[in-house]
Amino acid sequence: MSSMGGGRGSHVAPGEELTLLMVGITAVGTVAGIVFSISTWHTVMDWLVAHHLLVTAGESPVVVLPAAEGVGLDAPRLVVIGAALVAAIAAIASAVRRRLVVAEEMEQL
């Protein structure tokens, strides 16, 4: 019998303890992030509308954001976001390609 009171199967290996600790910390961080984002969602939406990054329901957005009371993106803003995504993907692809070329050159040495 185990002195820990757990009986059979209560032994946790050190690697498992670390894994449980990491899962617990991640879970707490996730819950805290969700609570923070829910509590600040409308404040953020108001700020984005005030700075003309989003449009109100009266301006008939093409894409309406969830839980934002009709606030969303119109066509010009969608084009800008699309262009930013294409630029980000191109930059990432270029960095990956450059990294592969450098790795290939290092192998040849």
Image (spheres, grey):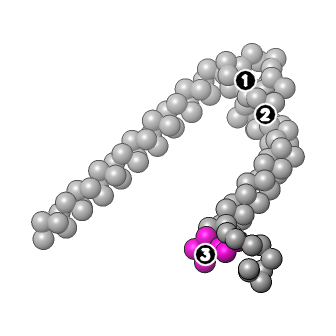
Q: Amino acid at mark 1?
A: Val
Q: Residue 32, how many percent across, how many down?
A: 80, 56
Q: Which residue of the protein is positioned furthest toward the bottom in this rendering?
A: 3
Question: Mark number for residue 13?
Answer: 3
Kind of element beneath mark 3: loop
Viewer-nearest residue: 70 or 66: 66
Mark 1 surroundings within 10 Å by alpha-carbon count, few (fewer than 14), some (14 through 19), many (20 or more): some
Residue on which disc 2 sits? 49
Q: Residue 66, how many percent across, how many down?
A: 76, 29
Residue 103: quadrant of the picture: bottom left
Q: Residue at x 78, y 33 (%)?
A: 49
Q: Amino acid at mark 3?
A: Ala
**What span is colored magenta in the figure?**
10-16
79 lies above or below 95: above
Residue on which disc 1 sits? 64
Q: CA distance from mark 2 to mark 1?
A: 13 Å
Q: Please give left or right for residue 42 compared with residue 106 in the image.
A: right
Residue 79: quadrant of the picture: top right
